[in-house]
Image (tube, grey):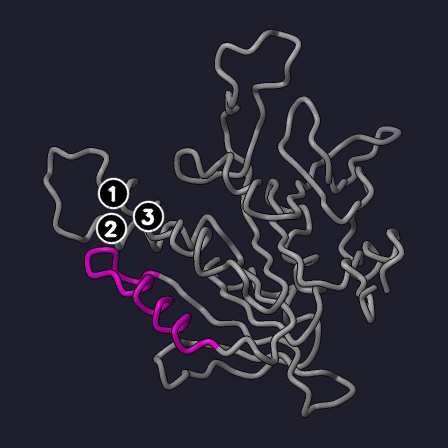
Amino acid sequence: MPKEFVDAHREPFSLFLYGPPGTYKSTLMSSLPKPMEVVFTDPFKKDIPYFNRGLVTDYQTSPEGILYREVYSKKDNEKRLIKLNYFHESNPNDPTGWDEFERFWESLDLSEIKTLVFDGYTAWEYLARVKADAMPHAEDDGWFVPRQSKKFIESYLRSFFYGIPCNLAMVGHVSKERINEAKGANDSMITHLFAPAAIGDLKQDIVRLFSETYITRVVKVEGEKRVQLQTEIDNKYYACTQMGMPDSMELTKDTTWKELVETIGVN
């Protein structure tokens, strides 16, 4: 018999949260376990949900040349809750954003971090695409840029992210087209679904690479618009939960991750 058992729900989780704008994705992400390190690629001012968690420092620059800000606890000004690291492409003709991210990744120490957040995937993918576009390639090769940028992204999704010692969370958007995953399947099977917006077949692969894939949806309840968190697949969207998170939970600007996991008996 083993000497002791562990609670599997307390193991690090991986979460991909996607959906339309304005559905509290970053707000929910900002409530994940702390200390938190954030790879922030969205425009400035979309970082406000993270700032709302405490006291915010001014912009600083790391030894690796990365722009960042920090959020400290209001109760304990010495306790850092969040570090936001900014990656933006200021000159697509001479791109530096992806290289800055890779320098950051090489220097990143996750030993004291509980959660690593990417906010968001779409702009992170853009950094990879601009980097690929600037590389030497034949002008008539129309597939080089998406193929090469996908290779950059996959190296992290399929290799570097595996086995990191903390929670991994990523924000994304929903694709504009449905994905046909099972060609030639009979009509009784669910084959055409909306998925996270990503390069090529990464649309389907992302939901396989993250143990938790949720989508935020706007629905009408008694004539009022509300945001729901969908955690299970249906006939329209990809979603999955290994933790057993309840499906179709209401999401507000005040909903926290702690409240959600308490519904499945995890404190």
Residue in view at x 69 percent, y 73 percent: 34
The residue that disc 3 covers is 151
x and y percentages locating residue 8 in the rendered image: 76, 59
Which amino acid type is shown beneath numbered disc 1? Answer: Val
Which amino acid type is shown beneath numbered disc 3? Answer: Lys
Mark linked to residue 8: none
Q: Tell me which numbered mark, 2 or 1, is placed earlier along the sequence.
A: 2
The residue that disc 1 covers is 145
Q: Quadrant of residue 155?
A: bottom left
Q: Tell me which numbered mark, 3 or 2, is placed earlier along the sequence.
A: 2
x and y percentages locating residue 204 in the rendered image: 51, 34
Which amino acid type is shown beneath numbered disc 2? Answer: Ala
> Which stretch is magenta?
89-108
Q: Quadrant of residue 234?
A: top right
Mark linked to residue 132: 2
* Relative height, residue 23 to residue 114 (above, below): above
Label 2 with label 1: CB-CB less than 8 Å: yes
**Is residue 40 toward the left or the right of residue 71 in the image?**
left
Label 1 element class: helix
Label 3 element class: helix
In this rendered view, identify the residue nearer to me: 259 or 114. Answer: 114
Residue in view at x 67 percent, y 43 percent: 214
